[in-house]
Image (spheres, helix red, strand yellow):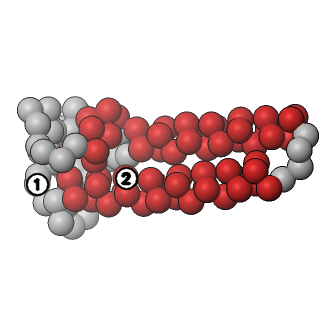
Amino acid sequence: MTIRQSLVRRANRAASAAVLFLLVAANLIVLGPRNIGIRGIFVLLMLVVVAAIVGQLLRIPCPNCQRSLGWAGFRAAHRARPGDDDRCPNCQVGFDAQVPAVPGAGADASR
């Protein structure tokens, strides 16, 4: 499995969890009490959870150096085609490289 495939799989799991949560929360808003304050709290909770999921995707660690991939990993997970910046910003390993058998195996070489 390549690093890109691993990133896409992780992003798909996060997207599935977000969609499931949003469906449940939307049902709670529609079928719940008619109180505007409670509905507002549900909407706020939905926004916080979606922001937390995006934040988690931005903190995906590189399997080679274990540092955060940031936007590079986020873009690689959501782009259909490889681009010019498809490398870890810290250790410069390409996202089309195989995931190391031991996580962080390249950490000593990049520091």
Q: In this picture, is 45 found above or below 64?
A: above
Q: Which mark is residue 20?
A: none
Which of labels 1 and 2 is toward the front? 2
Query: Label 1 neighbourhood size at 10 Å, few (<14), some (14-19), many (20+)?
Result: some
Relative horizontal placement of residue 59, taking residue 6 as reference (left or right): right
- Label 2: which residue? 11
**In terms of depth relative to the viewer, which is nearer, 23 or 74?**
23
Quarter holding residue 31: bottom right
Relative horizontal placement of residue 56, taking residue 35 as reference (left or right): left
| Quadrant occupied by the N terminus | bottom left
Describe the element under mark 2 as helix, strand or loop. Answer: helix
Gap in angstroms between the C-alphas marked 1 and 2: 18 Å
| Quadrant occupied by the C terminus | top left
Q: In the image, residue 64 lies at what x, y percent?
A: 22, 50
Q: Residue at position x 56%, y 42% from top?
A: 50
Q: Residue at position x 71%, y 38% from top?
A: 43
Amino acid type, label 2? Ala
Describe the element under mark 1 as helix, strand or loop. Answer: loop
Q: In the image, residue 57 lies at what x, y percent?
A: 42, 44
Quick one: label 1 or label 2, which is nearer the N terminus? 2
Q: Residue at position x 62%, y 37% from top?
A: 47
- Label 1: which residue? 97
